[in-house]
Image (tube, grey):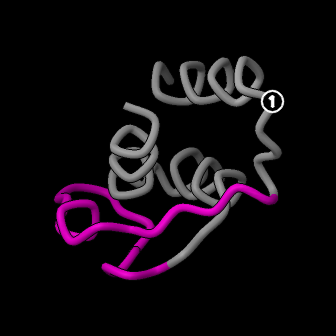
Amino acid sequence: MMTLITVIKLVARFGLNPVKTFITVSKAGSQVTGTTANLRAGDVLSVDQLLYGMMLPSGNDAAYTLAEYFG
């Protein structure tokens, strides 16, 4: 939940469009264990898609990718 809140606040602060801001999944992001959204290194997704991937299937890989990008 904190990753979701933090990303939403950063998107608003920097005036980003979450549908048009794209992030490439890193190798580290694709290798996160636990519940995942089955992301693969090199996948390119929007912030919006990653937020859904993080929240609906509880995708640790999507959360990691967002944290890596915004951190």
Q: Is residue 44 left or right of residue 26?
A: right
Give the x, y percent position of residue 37.
44, 67
Question: Dominant secondary structure of the magenta stretch?
Answer: loop
Q: Is residue 2 left or right of residue 5?
A: left
Residue occupying image coordinates x 20% and y 59%: 32
Task: Give the labeled residue for mark 1.
Answer: 15
Q: Is residue 47 left or right of residue 57?
A: right
Give the x, y percent position of residue 11.
70, 30
In the rendered image, which quarter is residue 67 located in?
top left
Give the x, y percent position of residue 44.
54, 75
Q: Is residue 57 magenta?
A: no
Q: Is residue 28 magenta?
A: yes
Query: Which stretch appears magenta?
Result: 20-43
Residue occupying image coordinates x 42% and y 45%: 69
Which amino acid type is marked by label 1? Gly
Direction front: furthest residue:
14
Residue occupying image coordinates x 31% and y 79%: 41
How many numbered callouts? 1
Residue occupying image coordinates x 39% and y 75%: 38
From the viewer's perspective, is residue 12 above or below residue 53? above
Dot 1 falls on a residue whose secondary structure is loop
Q: Residues within 10 Å of mark 1 (few under 14, many from 20)?
A: few
From the viewer's perspective, is residue 13 above or below residue 67? above
Q: What quarter of the picture does the C terminus occupy?
A: top left
Depth order, front residue of 15/57: 15
Depth order, front residue of 64/23: 23
Give the x, y percent position of residue 54.
51, 49
